[in-house]
Image (spheres, helix red, strand yellow):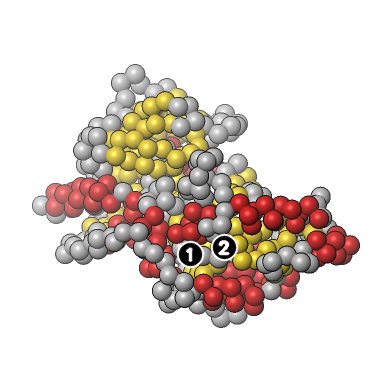
């Protein structure tokens, strides 16, 4: 295993690790490095920036959505042959769904991949205390390797001198002191950062690369990553290779500024199973691609493009037509909303949508659902038989209203926050839509069932 690798993690959310990661990835790419980006956790937005600045698809590393062995195999699959693999952590280094373990945290992924960590500390309103924070992280878990530090949000030359004195005799190097700079910020809104697909180029990409590379010792960072390449990654299990099918099914995948939340390795699995993925835009296209055998509409921000989505009546009609003809349709979160009768905006304005699912979605000011979910298929559907286990992640501000008393729920899920089982999603005939984001690689049986149903439709269509 010869993949130079480094993780950029933080003491907590909001310390600047995404900005720093983007700057380093962009800077190294401009210097000629082939950078393979990875992101810990179920995030879609940060990976969109990683992909843009490196030219390589960012791969999520998430043991809750997949498994430890899949995380390890995917790291090797995508990292092999690259100059360096850079992993951005999630939340704080040790934060995950449990308070008494590293499960689902950046620390867990670093341990699985035997990966050194650069820890980012926000020094705003701190000087010597920043060293105490670092010391706590260094001593908290001996099973991980914090190999260097980046001190962010340094307010002045005087502040920097105090911090340098505080870290003078530290056992690990401080590879960068980043001065506070309002240019090094990314725009945010209700679900976090604005995805890169909505931005013309990348916000301040040149400034990010220049300023961060000037203030971070990237030579030291690469040196630490190179030292890791000889360390073994102990594969926990062997994953069975998928036999390539002899057939191909064409699946139209919604991808534009309204719908762009996909785990790229999950889509890669669909391709391995026999799918040819064809992009289409619910915002701009008046009809579906020709000769398709299935549709996937992922999550995103339909609530920000309601005028354009609502006015595209010809595409609504085309989607209803193929639904009524039996074409398999799978949708998540924003796609779920799009398949409803309509969507109420944050201001209460109503916009008609495809009118397939008999209820409406309404945007709220507070989170309506967030967190990992586990459960089963509530009924047999295009993803498999009733009772099959499922897992995924929710993160949405909308909810459904005017739901009929008799409703064909797709999933039966355990909500850890509410500590109760809940019904979720809509499954009828050839359609399954829900707020649950799933990772196909972590649920290969569901992926196979979906592809199989697309194949059956293809055979029906070609008769």
The residue at the point 26 percent across, 54 percent down is 292
Q: Where is residue 51 in the image (x, y as percent from the top left)?
A: 51, 64
Alpha carbons under labels 1 and 2: distance apart: 8 Å
Q: Is residue 454 above or below residue 382?
A: below
Dot 2 corresponds to which residue? 145
Q: Position of residue 389 (x, y in %)?
A: 29, 39
In this view, the residue farthest toward the left is: 463
Q: Front-most of 165 and 268?
A: 165
Residue 414 left/right relative to 164: left
Q: Quadrant of residue 30?
A: bottom right
Tell me the SS state at disc 2: loop
Residue 455 left/right relative to 236: left
Tell me the SS state at disc 1: loop
The residue at the point 57 percent across, 43 percent down is 191
Give the mark, 1 or 2, whose residue is nearer the N terminus. 1
Q: Front-most of 287 and 420?
A: 420
Q: Front-most of 370 and 224?
A: 224
In this view, the residue farthest toward the bottom is: 32
The residue at the point 77 percent across, 63 percent down is 167
Q: Position of residue 15 (x, y in %)?
A: 68, 53
Q: Front-most of 157 and 335?
A: 157
Q: Is residue 402 above or below residue 62?
A: above
Dot 1 corresponds to which residue? 114
The residue at the point 37 percent across, 51 percent down is 66
Query: Dividing the image into 4 quarters, which one contains the N terminus?
Result: bottom left
């Amino acid at each position: 295993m010869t993949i130079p690798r480094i993780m950029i993690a933080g003491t907590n959310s909001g310390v600047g690790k995404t900005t720093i990661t983007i700057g380093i990835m962009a800077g190294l790419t401009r210097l000629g490095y082939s950078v393979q980006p990875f992101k810990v956790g179920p995030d879609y937005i940060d990976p969109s920036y990683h992909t843009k600045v490196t030219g390589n698809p960012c791969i999520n590393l998430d043991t809750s959505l997949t498994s430890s062995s899949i995380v390890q195999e995917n790291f090797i699959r995508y990292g092999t042959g690259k100059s360096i693999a850079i992993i951005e952590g999630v939340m704080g280094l040790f934060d995950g769904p449990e308070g008494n373990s590293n499960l689902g945290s950046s620390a867990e992924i670093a341990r699985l991949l035997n990966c050194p960590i650069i820890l980012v500390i926000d020094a705003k309103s701190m000087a010597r205390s920043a060293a105490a924070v670092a010391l706590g992280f260094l001593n908290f878990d001996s099973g991980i390797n914090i190999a260097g530090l980046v001190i962010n949000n340094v307010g002045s030359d005087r502040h920097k001198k105090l911090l340098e004195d505080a870290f003078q005799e530290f056992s690990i190097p401080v590879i960068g002191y980043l001065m506070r700079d309002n240019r090094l910020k990314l725009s945010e809104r209700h679900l976090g950062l604005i995805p890169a697909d909505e931005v013309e180029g990348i916000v301040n990409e040149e400034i990010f690369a220049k300023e961060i590379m000037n203030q971070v010792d990237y030579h030291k960072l690469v040196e630490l990553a190179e030292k890791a390449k000889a360390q073994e990654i102990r594969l926990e299990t062997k994953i069975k290779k998928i036999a390539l099918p002899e057939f191909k099914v064409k699946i139209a995948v919604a991808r534009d500024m309204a719908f762009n939340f996909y785990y790229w390795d999950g889509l890669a699995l669909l391709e391995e199973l026999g799918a040819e993925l064809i992009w289409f835009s619910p915002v701009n296209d008046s009809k579906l691609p020709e000769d398709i055998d299935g549709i996937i509409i992922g999550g995103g921000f339909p609530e920000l493009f309601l005028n354009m989505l609502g006015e595209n009546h010809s595409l609504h009609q085309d989607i209803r037509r193929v639904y009524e003809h039996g074409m398999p349709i799978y949708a998540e979160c924003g796609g779920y909303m799009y398949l409803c009768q309509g969507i109420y905006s944050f201001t209460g304005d109503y916009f008609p949508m495809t009118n397939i699912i008999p209820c409406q979605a309404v945007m709220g000011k507070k989170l309506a659902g967030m967190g990992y979910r586990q459960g089963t298929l509530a009924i047999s559907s295009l993803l498999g038989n009733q009772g099959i286990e499922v897992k995924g992640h929710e993160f949405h501000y909308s909810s459904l209203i005017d739901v009929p008393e008799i409703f064909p729920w797709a999933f039966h899920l355990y909500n850890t926050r509410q500590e109760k089982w809940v019904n979720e999603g809509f499954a009828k005939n050839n359609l399954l839509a829900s707020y649950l984001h799933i990772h196909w690689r972590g649920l290969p049986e569901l992926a196979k069932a979906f592809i199989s149903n697309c194949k059956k439709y293809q055979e029906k269509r070609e008769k």
